[in-house]
Amino acid sequence: MAHAAAPAAPKSFTVGRATDDVRKINVSWKPVTGADHYVVESIAGNVESVINVPSSALSYTLDAPDACSSYKIRVGAADADGNTSSTTYWTVKSLAPTYISGVTNGREDDGTTAWESWKAPSWAGESPLTGYHVVFSRVSDGGVIADETITDTTFRYKGVDPARAYNIAVSTVNAYGQCTPAKSTIDRFRPAEVTDLVVQRRADAASTVEVLWKPATNGPTPAYYLISYGQDKITSSLKVDATATKATLNLDAAKSWMIEVKAYNANGGSNAVSGSVPVWKPSSTPAPVTPPTSVPAPGATPSTPASSAPAPADPSAAPGTPGEPGTDSSTTTTTVTTGSDRTPPTITTTLSQASKNGWFRSAVTIHFNCADSDSAIATCPADVVADKDGYGLKFSGTAVDKAGNTATITQALSIDQTPPTVTAKVTGTKSAEGWYTAAPSIHYTCTDTVSGYNTVNVCPTDTTVTSDGVNQKITGTAWDKAGNSATDSVIINLDRTLPVIKASVIGGDANADGWYTTAPTVHFTCTDTGSGLATCPADVKVTTNGAGQKVTGTAVDKAGNASTATISVNVDLVGREDAAVSYDSTCTLAVTKAASTCGVKFSTQPGTRINLPDVFDIKHTEYPEGTYWSTQVAVTVTNDTATAREFRVRYQDVQDGDRVWVERAIFTDGQPGNVVPAGTSRVMVFDVWYNAVSDSSDVPDDLTLDFGYELA
């Protein structure tokens, strides 16, 4: 069944750093017909992020916190099945400068001055280059000798020890900082390698092996040479004077031998230059002066069969961990002592492919090229296929001319056909729904080992995910030195944005002063554009009297982010009619009763006539419009229930036929609050006002009080 074609790739695709924050990148595009969603892909170094955005969005802002990374970005339009058509990648260059290049270093003044030179970076960053940060340290203990920022492209340091090696790290710097330095090592002041090494048997004395070389033309003068030899590994050595350019070894002709030459001074030895001699196989008949017609010649004698099982070099004999092992070869010869042709043939190798960093990532065919200018070639080795992983594998082939002279070449190869392993680990805390509320970091662990050597070339840098989004796919790629690669991916849901919650009052009757006389309801409205809402608070009905009552609700999204909203309401549900009383949902009280089913009793019965104090005990307050008179009345409230209750006493006065509910601040008996414990009584003291302008002659000496209460 044919699949439907993906939507067209977005048009008018633009990318650029934000003007208000250069560590953010704005991406925008035009809408695409038929797109279910859009896919924004970002590659920073060797880490890729994939973010899905809804079809309603025509822009996205990426966090780009790493000043040292350039970002490759593209946008795709996808259908509901995930079929996607994408734009080409757009590259946003790094804020900080790139690496230096063209590094060279060495020593001067008999090795007591170290120097390094370099070329300026190809990209200075989004602000001008301000200098180069140089850290110069000892290899032996890591001790830092110099740490400085310079503007020149050459660094020199005098007074170093010729017998020590030093590390130098150079970082480019601008206003946005500096990045990973370019590191190199300045070796000990020791001789360079010898050149033109020849290792050959003497045909008239096959156990005699001649070793010839030329001294290096650069570097310090050697104090002596060390000729080392062995069969499977180096086991013996011969020290010769620095003036010598050859040496003779007595080696068993029935065995093959490896030989290496190093130049030494007081600071150490050079890298080894090596060769080998094969087992001696003489001709059965001396070669005649004329071109031979019946001289049997030995065939190819590779150090390993022309199969795929080469003998690896002993890692313990290798000088340290290799960087680029190379594809070096060495040639040894033997010559006959009679006849007119005493010149060995020539033999070279041609490899079926080029190496990368000195490594091959697939099987290599070694082809031997043989030639002879005198008596012609008798035998030339067959091709050898090297298809097993290993470091410094050696393959030998021998060319024989018709006079019996031989030339043996040993080809060194390093093969790695196995991809590295890379594992991504996320550090951070996520919710039960799988969401992070703070930027998580991803750490990559990479391994790749061949013959005991670590061959990882690039391991993804640690990455902090700073863009909110669902199902973000973050992929890191590891490379080994042969060019093999492997990836590991993690899926990240990140929501650092709080949900939005709003509180409003619905229902209830409010007067002009903002007091609700019937119970209002607080309603909460919640939204979340990230992980989605987990909870939004239910409506709250306020049935308690009081001023400035705060009602708070909390919204929580699936990531665990929480927001609150608070609203204040003034509620007064006490009745105002002549015979009305307060009530709750379980009981009522008529004003003519002394006790109620709610278990409340008053010491002064409702409707009791109160004798007021004499006029000189009555408080009075002067106001512009006249004098108001007041006194205080104490009422004992008894709680006959088994549960503590909170009461508020209120009254209405009856004077001259005017019955009006009068409410004033309630004064307690000196104890905080209005709670009456179960089975106890409390005295509630409150003001009684004669609510009329009068003079002293008009002050009443008594009035009738009706009491009510509210249950809080």
Image: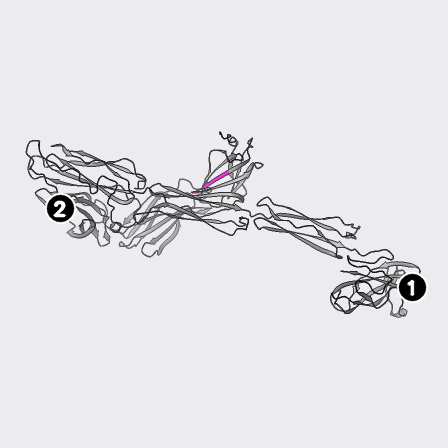
Asked whether residue 506 appears in the rendered view, the answer is yes
Amino acid at pointer 2: Ala
Q: Position of residue 554 (x, y in %)?
A: 64, 52
Q: Position of residue 572 (x, y in %)?
A: 78, 55
The residue carrying mark 1 is: 695
Q: Tell whether position 46 is magenta.
A: yes
Amino acid at pointer 1: Asp
State the residue in front, 673 or 119. Answer: 673
Q: Quadrant of residue 656?
A: bottom right
Query: Residue 254: which numbered mark, if any?
Result: 2
What SS does tag 2 mark?
Answer: loop
What SS does tag 1 mark?
Answer: loop
Labels 2 and 1 touching (C-beta < 8 A): no
Comparing labels 2 and 1, the label whose residue is closer to the camera: 2
Q: Tell whether position 419 is magenta.
A: no
Q: How many callouts does the rendering have?
A: 2
**From which residue to which does the magenta span run?**
40-48
Q: Is residue 620 left or right of residue 164?
A: right
